[in-house]
Amino acid sequence: MFRILSSAVRLRTAVLLSAAVLGASACSSDPSTSPSSKSQSVVGTYTLQEVDGAPVPVVIHDGLYFDAVNNHLYLLLVVTVSDGVIELDEQGNIGIWFDVDVWGDGAIWRRHIELQGTYKANGSQVTAYAGGQVMGTFSIVKGEIVDQADLLQEGVNKEYRFRR
């Protein structure tokens, strides 16, 4: 049961992180265009600094949790985001990763979740792609990426702040 949860949490978190942290987007531009359209001002490594104003590591869930995928109720599930990065390179590649600690039913899992894709920048507005599909959009303002996300699909958004 614990192995199944860790896989479910990892998969769910990877999908949610890619979509939620980058924001939902209805934008539909062509990801196959050359990276020459990249704005050099967005290139860099943005490190996760805060979640809802609290410095990382930060607990994003502490309590009862129903894992619908595995039909399992956790009387106590604690999920902590301990680190994260969004990296934009000069060739138009984006890398997103998070380190997440999960404690449930007495077992502890540490997961490194990573997603690779491409991006296009139009000024400070960035559209990210994974597998040729729009993953989301975000703005970079004064070296910061700030976005709302509901990583565990609980109906509660948290603010994730990354800084260069």
Image: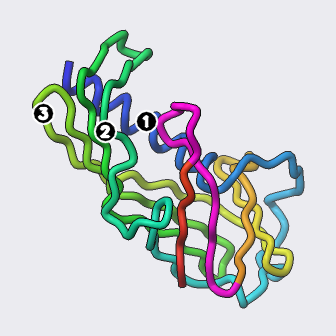
Say if 37 sits above or below 33 in the image. Answer: below
Most extreme residue toward the top is 71
Instruction: Residue type at mark 3: give it.
Output: Ala
Mark toward the start of the polypeptide (3 vs 2): 2
Mark toward the start of the polypeptide (1 vs 3): 1
Measure how far apart labels 3 and 2 are at the Cα level: 14 Å
Instruction: Residue type at mark 1: give it.
Output: Leu
Query: Pointer 3: residues within 10 angstroms few (<14), some, or many (20+)?
Result: few
Q: Residue 4: image x %, image y %? A: 27, 23
Is the residue under label 3 in contact with that under label 1 (CB below 8 Å)?
A: no
The span shown in magenta is: 142-157
User: Which element type, helix, strand or loop, lies under badge 3?
Assistant: strand
Left or right: residue 86 versus residue 23 is: left
Question: Mark number for residue 162?
Answer: none
- For disc 2, the marked residue is 62
43 falls in the magenta region: no
Say if 73 sits above or below 134 in the image. Answer: above
Q: Residue 78: image x %, image y %? A: 27, 39
- Residue drawn at x 59%, y 67% is 94
- Residue drawn at x 56%, y 58% is 159
Q: Nearer the viewer, residue 6 or 81?
A: 81
Q: Nearer the viewer, residue 41 or 163?
A: 163
- For disc 3, the marked residue is 107
Left or right: residue 88 versus residue 2 is: right
